[in-house]
Image: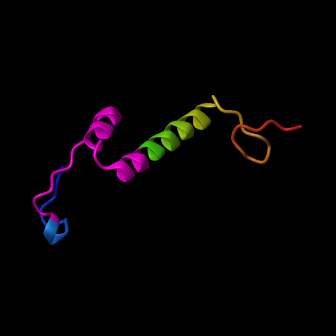
Amino acid sequence: MPEAGTGMPGEASFIARLCTIEEALERLKSWEVQRHIVEIAWKAWQYTLDVDSGRVPLSPQGVPGTVAQ
């Protein structure tokens, strides 16, 4: 929910909304660098969820995806 007077003056007319990752990537089709950044951020988020859920094992040192010897 937007709050009046909380944005930068040049951004007063900006509107933010949530969208799916697919929609975000589609909208960024012509913005190659920004699209790549969103893809990396999405993969990092998905990986974080996998680690948190235990789908990716942690070593005793806390390094994801490694197995202690």
Residue at far top of view? 55
Q: How is the image coloured?
A: rainbow
Q: Position of residue 55 (x, y in %)?
A: 63, 28
Task: State yes or no: residue 39 in magenta.
Answer: no
Position of the C terminus by quadrant: top right
Q: Position of residue 40 (x, y in %)?
A: 48, 45
Q: Nearer the viewer, residue 32 or 9?
A: 32
Residue drawn at 59 percent across, 37 percent down: 52
Q: Position of residue 54 (x, y in %)?
A: 64, 31
Q: Is 16 situated above or below 65? A: below
Q: Nearer the viewer, residue 37 or 14?
A: 37
Q: Is 69 situated above or below 62? A: above
Could you tell whether 12 is left or right of 52 in the image?
left
Residue drawn at 59 percent across, 31 percent down: 53
Instruction: Look at the image and give the residue range highlighted in magenta.
Output: 11-38
Q: Nearer the viewer, residue 27 or 50?
A: 27
Could you tell whether 22 is left or right of 51 in the image?
left
Q: Position of residue 20 (x, y in %)?
A: 31, 34
Quarter where residue 50 is shown: top right
Task: State yes or no: residue 24 in magenta.
Answer: yes
Residue drawn at 42 percent across, 50 percent down: 37
